[in-house]
């Protein structure tokens, strides 16, 4: 006896429709016209896919536009607005705002998140403790990886390192960095690599978040990644400086990232909102060319970053919208280009978080149904998932829209 059956699903790269049988949280059979009395969902020829994966999302500072305003529209304006609002954050308040974001993300087809949590003596471990509770309470629909990081600097804010260590000893999954906020950026990079080695965790930096091509921290991160043997365990986010590099310099940088085993996350909503504010006209886009970098075998992902806060006063937690935004701003249109954008919200971040993306017998029954026939169509039409399952349990469903003709 099966637990559940998904009927008439379209598998990426396959001809014809299949039924997918689920038992004990796993896929136990994929075949045409499986007969069963078990409950079922008719995909009606729509695309089945692994869930989307957020590789970079701030749950602790989401949904705070009612109390934090970015007066200048710049990165500095966003950081100071959040720093001021943070003194009023409580565990309860962070939990409620984070839950709102997670519930939106579930219904947009996301089933895993790497969340960046701010740690410093001001906020203490309140954000970390709230996110730990969210991780436990939403495990039925969402796998959450917690990345703790010093948003307001490490060496310039005594007490921060001790708190980061406390979090790492109490369930944080990895360590983030923000060297541009530190009085000693290279010192922060070195200390974080030392801590990563001590706790055996991956690293994920906020890095090079402006359009000045004359200096950057990427070279130091690459140098330490090789020195510590941490290749394949380091991500960098934003890196908007990459968007201003001429072709030859970009090629050298891609080679550097590949040799150092460093991956890139672009956050198009935030990068577009904050960068280029000193331009009155011909405003640069400031989105790193992830598709060009991914083409050379570097792990590249697209993520939401912020929802309804001074860094990004928008947000629906839709990764298909984020992939579309990236494709639009990067002027991508071919089938292959759009499929690569899909991979940057599904396959690449899933691999980063150590997850399988296969729809195959023996794999976890964790997938979504998208109203499309191809991955490219999902990106071009911003397809909203209609139904999702995690580990054999249905997690959400959007009823189809109805037209009432005259
Ligand atoms: Zn971020």
Image (tube, grey):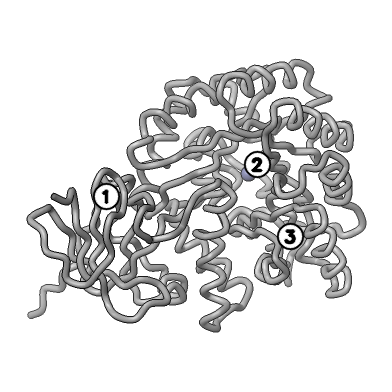
Picture quadrant of residue 153 = top right
Disc 1 to disc 3, C-alpha distance:
39 Å
Mark 1–mark 2 CB contact (< 8 Å): no
Mark 1 Cα shell of 10 Å, populated few (<14), some (14-19), many (≥20): some
Mark 2 Cα shell of 10 Å, populated few (<14), some (14-19), many (≥20): many
Q: Nearer the viewer, residue 118 or 21?
A: 21
As drawn, is 364 to the left or to the right of 53? left
Q: Mark 1 or mark 2, which has the lower sequence index?
A: 2
Q: Mark 1 and ligand 1: say if the CB distance to the nearest ligand atom is below 8 Å.
A: no
Disc 1 to disc 2, C-alpha distance:
33 Å
Pointer 1 residue: 396
Q: Quadrant of ligand 1?
A: top right
Between disc 1 and disc 3, the foreground one is 1
The x, y position of residue 308, in whole percent, is 49, 45
Q: Residue at x 65, y 69 (%)?
A: 291
Pointer 2 residue: 78
Q: Nearer the viewer, residue 379 or 197?
A: 197
Picture quadrant of residue 164 = top right
The x, y position of residue 345, in whole percent, is 52, 59
Mark 3 Cα shell of 10 Å, populated few (<14), some (14-19), many (≥20): some
What is the secondary structure assignment of the residue under circle 2?
Answer: helix
Pointer 3 residue: 276
Q: Quadrant of the C terminus?
A: bottom left
Disc 2 to disc 3, C-alpha distance:
14 Å
What is the secondary structure assignment of the residue under circle 1?
Answer: strand
As drawn, is 291 to the left or to the right of 388? right
Q: Residue at x 26, y 50 (%)?
A: 396
């Amino acid at each position: 006896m099966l637990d559940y059956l998904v009927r008439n699903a379209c598998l990426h790269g396959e001809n014809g429709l299949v039924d997918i049988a689920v038992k004990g949280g796993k896929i136990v059979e994929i075949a045409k016209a499986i007969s069963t009395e078990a409950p079922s969902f008719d995909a009606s020829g729509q695309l089945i896919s692994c869930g989307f994966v957020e590789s970079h999302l701030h749950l602790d500072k989401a949904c705070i536009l009612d109390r934090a305003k970015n007066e200048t529209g710049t990165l500095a304006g966003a950081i100071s607005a959040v720093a001021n609002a943070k003194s009023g954050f409580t565990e309860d308040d962070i939990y409620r705002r984070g839950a709102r974001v997670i519930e939106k993300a579930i219904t947009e087809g996301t089933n895993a998140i790497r969340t960046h949590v701010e740690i410093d003596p001001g906020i203490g471990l309140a954000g970390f403790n709230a996110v730990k509770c969210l991780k436990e309470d939403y495990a039925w629909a969402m796998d959450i990886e917690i990345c703790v990081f010093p948003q307001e600097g490490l060496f310039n804010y005594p007490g921060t390192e001790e708190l980061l260590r406390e979090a790492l000893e109490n369930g944080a999954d990895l360590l983030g960095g923000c060297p541009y906020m530190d009085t000693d950026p290279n010192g922060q990079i070195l200390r974080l690599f030392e801590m990563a080695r001590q706790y055996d965790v991956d690293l994920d930096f906020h890095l090079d978040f402006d359009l000045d091509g004359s200096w950057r921290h990427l070279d130091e991160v690459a140098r330490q990644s090789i020195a510590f043997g941490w290749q394949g365990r380091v991500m960098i986010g934003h890196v908007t400086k990459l968007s201003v590099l001429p072709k030859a310099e970009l090629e050298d940088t891609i080679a550097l990232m590949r040799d150092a085993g460093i991956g890139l996350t672009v956050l198009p909503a935030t990068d577009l909102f904050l960068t280029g504010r000193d331009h009155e006209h011909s405003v640069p886009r400031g989105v790193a060319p992830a598709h060009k970098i991914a083409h050379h075998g570097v792990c590249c992902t697209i993520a939401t970053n912020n929802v309804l806060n001074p860094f990004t006063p928008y947000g629906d937690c839709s990764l298909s919208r984020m992939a579309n935004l990236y494709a639009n701003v990067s002027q991508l249109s071919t089938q292959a280009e759009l499929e690569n954008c899909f991979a940057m919200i599904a396959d690449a971040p899933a691999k980063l978080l150590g997850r399988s993306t296969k729809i195959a017998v023996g794999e976890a029954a964790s997938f979504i149904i998208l109203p499309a026939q191809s991955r490219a169509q999902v990106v071009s039409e911003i397809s909203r998932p209609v139904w999702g399952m995690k580990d054999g349990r249905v997690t959400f469903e959007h009823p189809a829209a109805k037209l009432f003709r005259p």
